[in-house]
Amino acid sequence: MKAVILVAIGGAIGSVLRYLVSIWMKNLCTSDFPWHTFSVNIIGCLIIGFMFSLTLGNISFENLRLFLMVGILGGFTTYSSFGLETFDLIKQNKFLFASSYILATNIFGLVAVFCGYSIHKLVS
């Protein structure tokens, strides 16, 4: 139960942080490129890489990993988890899996967005 509470509190914090950074970036950059989402994703990847390295193999950091990596970064961006999982596959020399994961995530993600949009248009 403690783990769930850590993740929930962290997730709430991460979601609010994502919202605040997105607003700030939208006001800072007025181009058509989605800098706000890009920034959140890259910041999340930077932090998860640092935290992964810091806590690797140390069980005493488990609560910190749950709170920060799963909770805050999970609420801030799930792209950070995608980045870490891809990095881990590359680190294990599983290049085919890494490439497949990158392609499948992006292609199926876009297809899923299109399908969800189309389903809504059909039923409304």
Image: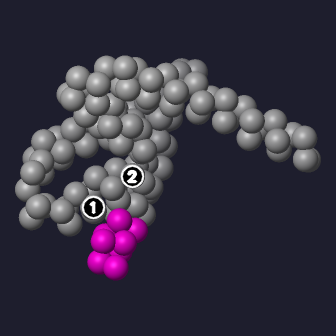
Q: Residue at x 11, y 61 (%)?
A: 59
Secondary structure, mark 2, is: helix
Amino acid residing under circle 1? Leu
Alpha carbons under labels 2 and 1: distance apart: 10 Å
Amino acid residing under circle 2? Gly
Q: To which quarter of the image does residue 39 belong? A: top left
In the rendered structure, the answer to whether residue 55 lies left or right of residue 35 reads left
Q: To which quarter of the image does residue 95 belong? A: top left
> Residue 30: x percent and y percent?
53, 25
Q: Is residue 51 magenta?
A: no
Q: To which quarter of the image does residue 65 belong? A: bottom left
> Residue 51: x percent and y percent?
18, 47
Q: Residue at x 8, y 56 (%)?
A: 58
First-in-chain label (2 vs 1): 1
Where is 19 relative to 112, above or below?
below
Residue 28 seen in the current view: no
Where is 83 relative to 16, above or below?
above
Where is 16 relative to 112, above or below?
below
Q: Which region is colored magenta?
A: 1-9
Secondary structure, mark 1, is: helix
Q: Are marks 2 and 1 in contact (CB under 8 Å)?
A: no
> Residue 121: x percent and y percent?
87, 40
The residue labelled by disc 2 is 74
The residue labelled by disc 1 is 66
- Badge 1 crowding class, 10 Å Cα cut-off, few under 14, some 14 to 19, many 20 or more, is many
Quarter of the image containing the N terminus?
bottom left
